[in-house]
Every structure is written in structure tokens, then in C-alpha cells.
């Protein structure tokens, strides 16, 4: 039997790991190379919302038992989005009932714990993921491509996939003209563990889904993460031997603020000072909100600049491609970033599988993937920019999500 095509993935985030599963299920050989020394080396967010795009991609790429583990460890269905002012007075709301957090990806709408999901995606990839592998460059070797790493090591494959985020080095070499732009908005993320006292502070509507607090040009996103099943119990039932680390149910909060409205926010501040800046900024808001933020796990507070990709004209396909934030980074305003990255993984896996089945060149499959990916990906970038920072934009996000896939 001929050796299956080999795919080298740079980046072990959600998109890269989903692609690894999808390609392995399609019969490809896969290696994943992640620059961080471990999967939990740095904070990368706490709560993400997945809709039918993300769930559908996971359903297509994961082994059935692993998809079941994903749904078992997801949060409860998100049935409402509520917009309130800083005194917790309701301004707008959208309710929807045709959603679930179960096995049907077409109706999936739920929050997930990002780190639990990443651990689920690592299951079954023993010996596939290499940590501490900082990508440096690639070079073509005939019909193959070789990836070089900062430690001098290298690996060759038939296809190189850059899943290495908004600062992608793969993209920088493949598409040196690609650019991102700074929105001037910063997002400070925090996490408050849920206990009896914190539960008493929560607005009742938060139990039904996402909440956005608006105060002038400042916003505070609130998301409750209560998992359907204890991850340890779910893993014991569905993937024996897998140990899922989990800190318990929590509330994610994320302050979005313009740089000019919170002086010093762009400084390299330690987590404690960053947390202090946030509590000071919302000190006059409803006391329950102030107490909720004050009770956070202070050392887990971190800041992210909100940047988005500038859409690109089509480029000539090759045996190097990109997915997720490496090509279409976007504002979180529509909740599309993770969903699009997972969708990329599924579309790429299917395109490559179809090419091998039909005996057509991999580069043709890459071209078909890139044509589709840039269509929905850059549409999501533009929609997220329009939605950023406005109550109307948040409602647009919800209606867009109910439309399922771009």
C-alpha cells in the first residue's frame, strides 16, 4: 500500500486540532506542531459560543465517541441574549427556542469551556502533537514542503497548514501582502468561579444565555458556563483513561473599551493591576456587577487587542495553506471566530479527502478549499466589524447565528 499523504499542521489551537482529527479520519498522516510548551501554557479565553457551524464541523471531523464527549461537556443551551445598561435595566432581548446542546449539530447553540474543549480535541492525538515547536519558515522541495522550526528541526510533508493564529508566520511567508488592522478596542477577559455567593449576584436572565452590559462606549460581556455533565464522569463513560482538567462552573466576563477611554490599558500590566483597572472603570455600575468582577480569579485576568484581517483577493493555490485566525481574524462581536476556524478544518478535510478519492492533485483541493473559505471567512470578518461595539450589532449577531452558516 502506498504511504498516505502527509500533512504538517502548524498550530495546536481549536482549528488545528479539529483539522488533525478530520484529516486522520480521511486517511491522511498528520503531525501538529505547537510553539507553546503545553496546551495550557497561557490564557486564551474561557468561554466560547459554538453554533451549528462549529458543532457541524466537529461532527464531521471527530470520531463519534469524541463528538459525544464534546456535547456531554458543553454548556446548557443558549436560549436568550439580553442587553442591559450598567444599572442592569433591560434594553433589548432576543429569545429563540429551536436550539439544543445535544447531538444534532444543526440546532446546536451552547457555550463551551475553551480549555475543556481543547482537552477533548487532544484525545486520540497521542504522538501527533509536538509542543515547544516554534515555526520559523518553510521551503519547497519539489512536490513536497518542509517546515523548519526555531530549534533547527524540520519535518517534510505533502501539505503545510498554517493554523498559527493572527500573528501567523506561515501566512507571513505565503501571503506577505496580507494585513490586519487594529480596531482601537481592547478586551480584558476575566473568570469568576461560581459558588453560592456569586450565584446570588447573577442577573436571572444570565441563566438563559449571553448578556451584554452597555454603558456608553464601554461594554461588559457576561457568559455563564455550566456544563451538562462533569467532564471527569463524561470521560470515564466515553473515553476511558482520558483525564479532563476542569476548574468548575464559572462566569466569564469581558470588558471591551477603547484605548482612549482607559489610559494605560495598552501597557504591559500584570494581571492584578489589569484587574484593578477594570474594577475602577466600572466602580459606579450596579453593585452586583462590581462584586462579580471583584471576585474574579485575579491572576487569570488578561488583555487582548481587537484586530481583524483585511480581506484578500484570491491567490494562487499551492501545497501551503492557512485556516482560522491565520487568514480571517475578526472581532468577537458576532461570535464567529472559533466557529469559522472549525468550519475551515472540516471544509479542508473534506476537500482533501475528495481529491484523494477522485485521484486529483492536492493543490486543486487546496484551491477549492481556499475559494470557499475566503468567501464565508471574509464575509464573517466584515459582519463582525459592522457589529462591533453596538447593541444593534449584538442583535445582528444573534439573528446571524440563527441563520446558521454564512
Image (cartoon, helix red, strand yellow):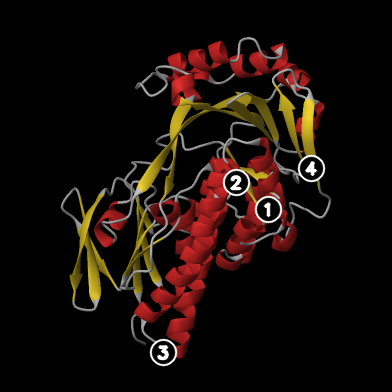
Q: Nearer the viewer, mark 4 or mark 3?
A: 4
Which residue is rendered at x = 37% and y = 79% of the image? 362
- Between the residue at mark 2 and the residue at mark 3, the CA separation in whole angstroms equals 37 Å
Label 1: how many residues lie within 10 Å, few (<14), some (14-19) or many (20+)? some
Q: Residue furthest right?
A: 97
For numbered disc 1, what is the local secondary structure? helix
Marks 2 & 4, CB-CB < 8 Å contact: no
Among numbered discs 4 and 3, the one appearing first in the sequence = 4
Q: Which residue is mark 4?
A: 94
- Label disc, if present, on residue 401 of the rendered structure: 1
Image quarter in which the C terminus is found: bottom right
Q: Which residue is mark 2?
A: 335
- Between the residue at mark 2 and the residue at mark 1, the CA separation in whole angstroms equals 8 Å
Residue 43 in the image: x percent, y percent? 46, 34
Among numbered discs 2 and 3, the one appearing first in the sequence = 2
- Between the residue at mark 2 and the residue at mark 4, the CA separation in whole angstroms equals 15 Å
Which residue is rendered at x = 81% and y = 49% of the image? 96
Q: Which residue is mark 3?
A: 359
Residue 392 in sight: yes
Query: Where 105 sits versus 169, above or below?
Result: below
Q: Is residue 160 left or right of residue 281?
A: left
Which residue is rendered at x = 39% and y = 43% of the image? 181
Marks 2 & 1, CB-CB < 8 Å contact: yes
For numbered disc 4, what is the local secondary structure? strand
Among numbered discs 2 and 4, the one appearing first in the sequence = 4
Label 4: how many residues lie within 10 Å, few (<14), some (14-19) or many (20+)? some
Q: Nearer the viewer, mark 2 or mark 4?
A: 4
Which residue is rendered at x = 44% and y = 54% of the image? 328
Residue 376 in the image: x percent, y percent? 54, 62
Amino acid at each position: 500500500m502506498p504511504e498516505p499523504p502527509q500533512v504538517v499542521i502548524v498550530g495546536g489551537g481549536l482549528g488545528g486540532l479539529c483539522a488533525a482529527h478530520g484529516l486522520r479520519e480521511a486517511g491522511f498522516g498528520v503531525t501538529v506542531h505547537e510553539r507553546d510548551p503545553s496546551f495550557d501554557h497561557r490564557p486564551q479565553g474561557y468561554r466560547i459560543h459554538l453554533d451549528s457551524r462549529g458543532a457541524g464541523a466537529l461532527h464531521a471531523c471527530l470520531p463519534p465517541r469524541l463528538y459525544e464527549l464534546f456535547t456531554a461537556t458543553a454548556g446548557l443551551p443558549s436560549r436568550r441574549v439580553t442587553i442591559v445598561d450598567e444599572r442592569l435595566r433591560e434594553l433589548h432581548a432576543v429569545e429563540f427556542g429551536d436550539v439544543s446542546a445535544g447531538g444534532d449539530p444543526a440546532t446546536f447553540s451552547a457555550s463551551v469551556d475553551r480549555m475543556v474543549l481543547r482537552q477533548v480535541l487532544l484525545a486520540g492525538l497521542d504522538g501527533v502533537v509536538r509542543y515547544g515547536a516554534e515555526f520559523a519558515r518553510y521551503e519547497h522541495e519539489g512536490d513536497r514542503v518542509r517546515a523548519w522550526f526555531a530549534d533547527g528541526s524540520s519535518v517534510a510533508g505533502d501539505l503545510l497548514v498554517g493554523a498559527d493564529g493572527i500573528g501567523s508566520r506561515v501566512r507571513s511567508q505565503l501571503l506577505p501582502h496580507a494585513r490586519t488592522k487594529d480596531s482601537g478596542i481592547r478586551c480584558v477577559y476575566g473568570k469568576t468561579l461560581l459558588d453560592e455567593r456569586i450565584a446570588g449576584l447573577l442577573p436571572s436572565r444570565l441563566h438563559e444565555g449571553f448578556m451584554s452590559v452597555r454603558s456608553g462606549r464601554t461594554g461588559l460581556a457576561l457568559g455563564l458556563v455550566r456544563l451538562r455533565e462533569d467532564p471527569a464522569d463524561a470521560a470515564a463513560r466515553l473515553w476511558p483513561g482520558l483525564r479532563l482538567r476542569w476548574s468548575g462552573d464559572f462566569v466569564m466576563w469581558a470588558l471591551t473599551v477603547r484605548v482612549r477611554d482607559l489610559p494605560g490599558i495598552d501597557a504591559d500590566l500584570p494581571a492584578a493591576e489589569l484587574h484593578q483597572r477594570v474594577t475602577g472603570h466600572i466602580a459606579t455600575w450596579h453593585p452586583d456587577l462590581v462584586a462579580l468582577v471583584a471576585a474574579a480569579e485575579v491572576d487569570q485576568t488578561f488583555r487582548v487587542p481587537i484586530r481583524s484581517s483585511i480581506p484578500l483577493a484570491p491567490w494562487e493555490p499551492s501545497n501551503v495553506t492557512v485556516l482560522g485566525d491565520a487568514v480571517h481574524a475578526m472581532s468577537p462581536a458576532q461570535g464567529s471566530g472559533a466557529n469559522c476556524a472549525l468550519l475551515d478544518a472540516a471544509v479542508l478535510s473534506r476537500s482533501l479527502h475528495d481529491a484523494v478519492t477522485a485521484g486529483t492533485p492536492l493543490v486543486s483541493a487546496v484551491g477549492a478549499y481556499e475559494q470557499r473559505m475566503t468567501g464565508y471567512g471574509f464575509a464573517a470578518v466584515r459582519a463582525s466589524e459592522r457589529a462591533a461595539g453596538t447593541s444593534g450589532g449584538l442583535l445582528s449577531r444573534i439573528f446571524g447565528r440563527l441563520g446558521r452558516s454564512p
